[in-house]
Amino acid sequence: MNVVIIGAGRRGLRLAKHLIEEDKKVIFLDSSSERCQQATAKLDCLAVCGSATDVEKLKEAQVADASAVIAVTDNDETNLVSCGIVASEFPEVKTTIAAIRSISYLGQESHHPILGISYIVNPDQEAANRIIGILRSGLFKDVISFPDAHFMLFATDIKKDSPFKDKTLIEARKEIPGQYVIAGIRRKNKVFTPYGDSVIKVGDEIAIIVDEEESKDIFTELNGPVDDSRIRKILLIGATRITRYLLSEFTVQERKRVTLVEKDEATAREFLDLFPEILVLNASITDEAIWEEEKLYDTDLVISVTENDELNIIASLYAKRLGAKRVISLIKTNNNYLQLATHLDIDAAISTTNATVDTLVRHLRGSTIETLHTLFDGDLEVYEFVIGRDFKYLDKALKDVNLRGRIIIAGIKRGEDENFIPGGNYSFTLNDTVIVAAAHRDQQLVQALFGANAE
């Protein structure tokens, strides 16, 4: 599979790394010679320097031979026009995906195709969806929910006092009952899918998929008591597009409990007009006086989503120091801060890049995938499939399907109310939603088994 990526920035590079590890050929097209040189120096790829709206440059980038073209520059117009040109001039390209932030292009539905483009992905909305998932989970950690199945996914470190320490998966299941599956383990930067005799060790990071109703119990067992007190006050820092999406998802009653701090007067006034229920403060969050005058520290949740990563981290830490109960920080431009945030007193750090790349990869993998999420820097993948009539193992028992010890079937949702962890006698049934976990290196096996191959 050949993929042309328009834009060799942070999203393009992360996406390319993911695809190259799958033995896909990647060619960048970028207007900056410096970015092109950096891409070829860091990755095993080709790069063409030039305009993505120039048909001749598209030809030079071998678009005609590509299975997919993905435009992820920081310019909406470039992404939109370049993908539109590809859809029009290169009909042999099966998939075109454009990253578009401006809501003026998207209307009410961010994935509505226009100009013949297969998919439109909104990075800001993807990040906002991650934050909403955390709020709805009640755990206030970097958890991921699945829209079509009542399961949640989160990662946690195994410390010396962990109840899982030095236990095999079989022993852990006996001693710590519940609807959960350990879907992956990262040990000394190596990721693997565990089996029953795998021993969990101090220093491991484990990925857990848990039934939504039991999430707090399992989370408490691993991380200590969950503060499930009611969220009375929310402080939003920065009036950005992500803020707009968040406020749009809040109910009117929830918005009445929100204070928004924005230093730009015109933007502050715009948000007050859009959401009259909220309290808008036209001030700089770096002004110590505003914290005391408005008692901003007296809040249950701080969500910092400015365009500045450093400001988001500093403001969150400052709020926590002054007494805020929980804080969520947006990491928009520098993913290196994610690891830093896990060692600081930040409850959840949300990466716009990671959220966007997960969605881009899902579209590339094929139409049978409802969602795709990655953990451990992309080395573990968790899929959500819906079993269709063309599924090759329809009505077959799980024990009769050779998963080669590399794929974990972590959860099943059947109908509206039935949620369970499958055993060997489970039979793949039409319209079941299946949660599947595997190491990234085994993604081709997942595609072969579940028919997710986009090619």
Image: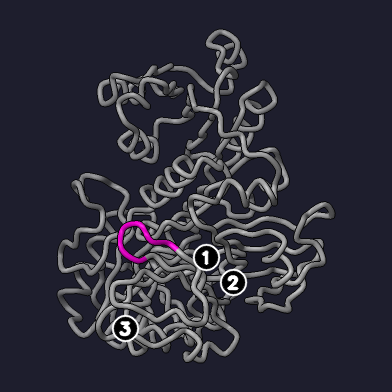
Q: Name the spot of residue 150 as percent of width and height, x first.
A: 42, 56
Question: Closer to the camera, 33 or 61?
Answer: 61
Residue identified by numbered label 3 = 67
User: Can you say whether 132 is above or below 35 in the image?
Assistant: above
Q: CA distance from mark 3 to mark 2?
A: 24 Å
138 is higher (above) or lower (below) than 147: above
Mark 3 and mark 2 residues within 8 Å of each other at the beta carbon: no
Residue 356 visible: yes
Task: Check the image and report above or below for 24 versus 256.
Answer: below
Residue type at mark 2: give it: Asp
Residue at (54, 76) in percent of width and height: 408
Q: Position of residue 181 (x, y in %)?
A: 58, 66
- In three-dimensional space, the C-alpha distance between marks 1 and 2, rounded to whole angstroms, equals 7 Å
**CA gap, disc 1 to disc 3?**
23 Å
Q: Decide: marks 1, 2 in contact (CB < 8 A)?
A: yes
- In percent of width and height, residue 171 lies at 74, 69
Specify which label sits upstream in the sequence, 1 or 2.
Answer: 1
- Checking the image for residue 379, the label placed there is 2
Magenta residues?
414-419
The disc, 1 or 3, on the residue closer to the chain's N-terminal end is: 3
| Numbered circle sitting on residue 374 | 1
Q: Secondary structure at mark 3?
A: loop
Q: Mark 1 or mark 3: which is in front? A: 1
| Residue at left offset 35%, top offset 60% | 148
Say which amino acid is labelled 3.
Ser
Closer to us: 417 or 260: 417
Using the image, determine if residue 367 lies above or below residue 319: below
Per the image, label 1 sits on a secondary structure element best described as strand
Kindly state the secondary structure of the residue where label 2 is placed. Answer: loop
